[in-house]
């Protein structure tokens, strides 16, 4: 009690104006005005080097000596869309690589990585995949050896496959009771149809995956000529090359570079509203979507600005209207899903069931206004530009952030000054550009509109809006009736 009393007395003395004056006079800081913003941080992309390793993989090195840490990431061109694998297999590969190799059990892998203070992450997507880890510089060789062991010598135990299958089936079953999850499964099917981009993993797919499927996909995916390795941190170009040549001796040149082609986006007809029935749900998931051109098309910066104003920022039109002004949703946003082939621009949110029709009316009004009837203001443009550009310098604060920024340029064979060009294009985007992008890529008369919710309570009011014809679908996207 004595010590606590003394501490309280000291704090009281320090907090008095007399004490402050004794330390150098009263504060002159004006607390009635917010402090002025500091200078805009500059985005200066670090220099990098590019080499080719003896097995055919590209090596990109960004040296940063400030901390004794190295971040390794390896990006593979081509994914499940190009490798023709059975749906659902890719979700098992990354998990099963940590279940044991011919020389290490799963527990040994966990312990060895824990002693190094690192973890190795694997992922395979539709168009690409990656392997990554971060370690102390002195532990890099050991971490790289474990990574190669997992890539090339995993045993894919049958018992682990069944355990993972049970987990995924349970998660799938839970998801079928969530309006947002169901909407996420139906949306690509309605936009892309039978294209690979429209495939969604279902229960039958998960049950059909075999151990041979997993091993076959890993073998087809881990081909060095399709890989670009990024080493960022406390390591020079020469050091990185020597260390990886040693680690990759067990991974020699093999296979062929993938020749990749992408389908064109399917034509979208006049706006139609699809309703998927999930009885008794207190909310409806509302989705308005269109396909996009491939990433890095000339319109990309302008689309990003348009999306920020439409629903990409908290103060965007959709969120300000549906959430802030009317309270129909906890959040209504939009975002582009860029892809090497046709991407997707989606506006969505969970809305109160009784206000599903009103939310749809507001969303359509805001989107139509963005096409020109409600021109973008200078304040909106400034906020959108800032949200897209002023955060970029913070990406360069970490090794993983640097790897992400540099890899976007190298993976896609873009000019080295692509980021400078992107920032300039964003800042040059005008109100007229935004209206043109909205009219082109979010045309209100050619939208895919999906509502997942209690159709008995919302269908008649949705039809009464007169926005578009209404059809009914099941949870797979199959048409039930008009």
Image (cartoon, helix red, strand yellow):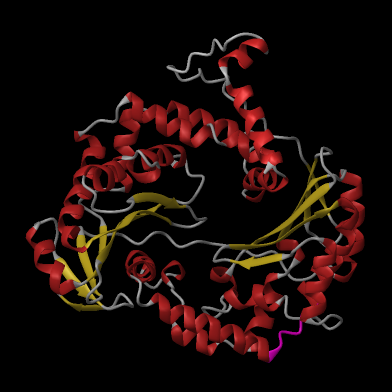
Q: Position of residue 193 (x, y in %)?
A: 35, 70
Taking depth in this image into account, of 42 and 252 the one nearest to the observer is 42
Magenta part, dominant SS:
loop
Q: Is residue 289 visible?
A: no
Total residue callouts? 0
**Residue 155 is inside the magenta segment:** yes
Taking depth in this image into account, of 404 and 324 the one nearest to the observer is 324
Q: Position of residue 377 (x, y in %)?
A: 30, 27
Q: Is residue 232 visible?
A: yes
Q: Which residues are magenta?
A: 153-158
**Residue 211 is inside the magenta segment:** no
Q: Position of residue 135 (x, y in %)?
A: 81, 55
Given the current orientation, which residue lies at the most extreme front position?
2
The residue at the point 32 percent across, 51 percent down is: 332
Given the current orientation, which residue lies at the most extreme left position?
464
Tell me: residue 196, above or below residue 5.
below
**Quadrant including the N terminus:** top right
Q: Is residue 12 left or right of residue 468?
A: right
The residue at the point 25 percent across, 71 percent down is: 281
**Quadrant including the C terminus:** bottom left
Taking depth in this image into account, of 199 and 398 the one nearest to the observer is 398
Q: Is residue 326 left or right of residue 339?
A: left
Q: Position of residue 145 (x, y in %)?
A: 86, 67
Quarter of the image holding residue 324?
top left
Q: Is residue 157 left or right of residue 412?
A: right
Taking depth in this image into account, of 476 and 162 the one nearest to the observer is 162
Tell me: residue 323, above or below residue 194.
above
């Amino acid at each position: 009690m004595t010590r606590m009393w003394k501490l309280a007395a000291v704090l009281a003395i320090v907090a008095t104006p007399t004490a402050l004056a004794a330390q150098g006079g009263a504060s002159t800081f004006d607390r009635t005005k917010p402090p002025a913003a500091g200078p805009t941080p500059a985005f200066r992309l670090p220099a990098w080097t590019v080499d080719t390793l003896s097995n055919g993989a590209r090596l990109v090195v960004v040296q940063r000596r400030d901390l004794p840490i190295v971040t390794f990431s390896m990006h593979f061109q081509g994914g499940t869309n190009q490798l023709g694998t059975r749906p659902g297999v890719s979700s098992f590969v990354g998990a099963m690589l940590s279940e044991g190799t011919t020389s290490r059990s799963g527990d040994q892998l966990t312990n060895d990585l824990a002693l190094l203070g690192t973890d190795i992450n694997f992922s395979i997507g539709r168009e690409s995949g990656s392997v990554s880890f971060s370690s102390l510089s002195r532990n890099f060789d050991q971490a790289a050896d474990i990574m190669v062991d997992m890539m090339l010598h995993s045993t894919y135990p049958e018992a682990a496959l069944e355990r993972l299958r049970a987990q995924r089936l349970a998660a799938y079953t839970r998801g079928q009771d969530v309006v947002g999850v169901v909407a996420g499964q139906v949306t690509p099917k309605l936009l892309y149809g039978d294209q690979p981009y429209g495939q969604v993993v279902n229960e039958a797919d998960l049950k059909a995956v075999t151990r041979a499927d997993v091993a076959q996909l890993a073998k087809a995916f881990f081909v060095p000529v399709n890989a670009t390795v990024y080493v960022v941190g406390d390591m020079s170009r020469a050091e990185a090359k020597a260390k990886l040549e040693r680690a990759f001796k067990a991974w020699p040149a093999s296979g062929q570079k993938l020749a990749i082609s992408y389908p064109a986006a399917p034509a979208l007809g006049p706006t139609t509203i699809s309703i998927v029935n999930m009885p008794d749900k207190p909310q409806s998931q509302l989705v308005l979507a269109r396909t996009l051109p491939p990433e890095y098309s000339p319109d990309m910066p302008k689309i990003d600005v348009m999306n920020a104003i439409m629903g990409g920022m908290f103060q965007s039109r959709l969120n300000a209207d549906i959430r802030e002004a009317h309270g129909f949703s906890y959040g209504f946003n939009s975002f582009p899903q860029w892809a090497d082939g046709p991407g997707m621009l989606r506006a969505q949110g969970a809305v109160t069931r009784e206000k599903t029709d009103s939310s749809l009316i507001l969303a359509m009004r805001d989107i139509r206004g963005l096409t020109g009837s409600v021109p973008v203001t200078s304040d909106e443009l400034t906020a959108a530009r800032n949200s897209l550009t002023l955060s970029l310098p913070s990406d360069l604060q970490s090794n993983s952030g640097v790897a992400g920024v540099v890899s976007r340029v190298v993976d896609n064979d873009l000019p080295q000054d692509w980021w400078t060009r992107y920032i300039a294009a964003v800042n040059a985007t005008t109100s007229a550009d935004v209206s043109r992008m909205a009219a082109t890529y979010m045309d209100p008369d050619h939208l895919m509109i999906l509502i997942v919710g209690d159709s008995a309570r919302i269908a008649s009011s949705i039809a009464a809006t007169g926005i578009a014809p209404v059809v009914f679908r099941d949870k797979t996207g199959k048409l039930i009736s008009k």
